[in-house]
Image (cartoon, rainbow, N blue to C red):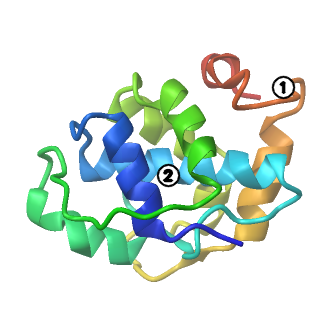
Amino acid sequence: MTIATYQAVKQICNAGEWRISNLKLQKMLYIAHKVYMGRNEGEPLINELFEAWDYGPVLPSLYHKLKMFGSDPIKDIFWDTKNPKLPFLEEACKHLLPMSGGKLVALTHREGGAWSKNYQPGILGIIIPNEEIFEEYKQSSKGCVEVIQGLSTYIENPI
């Protein structure tokens, strides 16, 4: 069972006290999705597929819903919802919220990662398959048994 994208967004933005930009949100959601898949045998966290865009992995429907905010923090335009995967997002937010958008971009643009394998400059609509995101997790988590628990270590010393 996946979590609806907007449920995840509401959880992340609540944790970040609604001071998160669209860019930072997209990267946090991608990293949380990758780590969740890694910890759960490839089971996706959210119910949409990321695309490889110029600034990294993007959920197009989310981007279009939030683009009115530009680079400003997102406002609460989402319904309240419940899902058993929400505690995982709380845990991920503890590690990802303190990072800058630039640091999150660097993490999602890793050479040989799922985004870099699929990105083609100027072309939109290229899906980043969940299987490749899961494979990126497995490759990058060598030496890091629990990435969320050791997310700070992974981020400082990605493999």
From the viewer's side, name the closer residue of 149 and 101.
149
Quadrant (top left/top right/bottom left/bottom right) for the C terminus: top right
Residue under numbered circle 2: 29
SS at circle 2: helix
The residue type indicated by label 2 comes to Leu
Mark 1 surroundings within 10 Å by alpha-carbon count, few (fewer than 14), some (14 through 19), many (20 or more): some
Tell me if I can see residue 112 in this picture: no
Please determine whether, in this image, residue 76 is positioned above or below residue 152.
below
Quadrant (top left/top right/bottom left/bottom right) for the N terminus: bottom right
Image-based side of 46 in relation to 66, left or right: right
Residue 137 image offset from top left, x and y in percent: 77, 46
Residue 46 image offset from top left, x and y in percent: 59, 67
The residue type indicated by label 1 comes to Cys
Residue 34 image offset from top left, x and y in percent: 67, 51
Residue under numbered circle 1: 144
From the viewer's side, name the closer residue of 89 and 111.
89
From the viewer's side, name the closer residue of 68 and 156.
68
Residue in the image at 88% along x and 28% along y:
145
Residue in the image at 76% along x and 50% along y:
136
Label number found at residue 135: none
> Where, by quadrant of the figure, is residue 134 drawn?
bottom right
Q: CA separation, marks 1 and 2?
A: 20 Å
Please determine whether, in this image, residue 115 is positioned above or below residue 158.
below
SS at circle 1: loop
